[in-house]
Amino acid sequence: MDVLQLIKEAITVEAQAVHGLLEQIDGNYVAAVTLLRACQGKVVVTGVGKSGIIGKKMAASFASTGTPAFFMHATEGVHGDSGMIAEDDVVILISNSGETSEVLSLVPVLRQIGCQKISITSNHNSTLAKVSDVSIAYRYEREADHLGLAPTTSATLTLVIGDALAVTLSILRGFSSADFHRYHPGGSLGAKLTRIQGE
């Protein structure tokens, strides 16, 4: 097997899916940004498995760019952690199929809390999408692995969507490099911003 060709093929599958996402952007993205921008509490991101891992990064991106956020594992949410969620929060629920039982089991709890819900799935007609206040859905041909099963392309698309939402909110909030430095004083980024601000 040609290892370089296999690597290129995997990257090509995901790159084409990300490019195809541009044609799928619709009013639901605007509605999601509007909801998130108006949030008086925090943004809570939840999911399980690979979606949960992407959710952790998504919450971290929101938090570091001016939108207070944290990640809550969906399973832990029905075992007490949902006590961290308040009525004025917005919860982003991630599930590729929109039918993940652990994520769906959280919905009745969120309904009782009274917070608003944004779903990110691959299907506007899924159960999760239908019970959400805003549904963001992406389409893609296949996952990047040879079996077409591992969350690869779908995970990348979710990550890109999360980054796009975070960046858009950051711009709308007028988030500056000084604000970024406040939350990120460490590492090479922090050192670079310290030098810039000292000039």
Image (cartoon, rainbow, N blue to C red):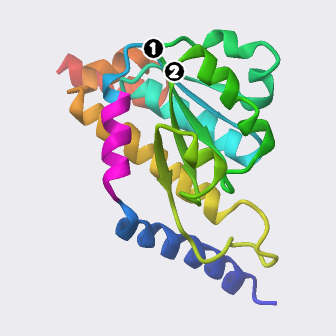
Q: Nearer the viewer, residue 44 or 173?
A: 44
If the image is split into quadrants, where does the N terminus sit?
Answer: bottom right
Residue 23 occupies quadrant = bottom left
Amino acid type, mark 2: Cys
Position above or below: 84 against 154: above
Which residue in the structure is indicated by mark 1?
A: 88
Residue 28 % position (x, y): 37, 49
Q: Residue at image x 58%, y 60%?
A: 123
Which residues make up the magenta segment? 26-36
Circle 2 packing at 10 Å, graded few (<14), some (14-19), many (20+), is some
Residue 3 % position (x, y): 75, 82
Amino acid type, mark 1: Asp
Q: Which dot marks residue 115?
A: 2
Image position of 156 (left or right of 172): right
Sequence-first disc among 2 and 1 = 1
Q: Which dot marks residue 10?
A: none
Q: Nearer the viewer, residue 6 or 69?
A: 69
Residue 178 magenta-drawn?
A: no
Q: Are marks 2 and 1 in contact (CB under 8 Å)?
A: yes
Q: Main secondary structure of the magenta part?
A: helix
Q: Residue at image x 78%, y 63%?
A: 150
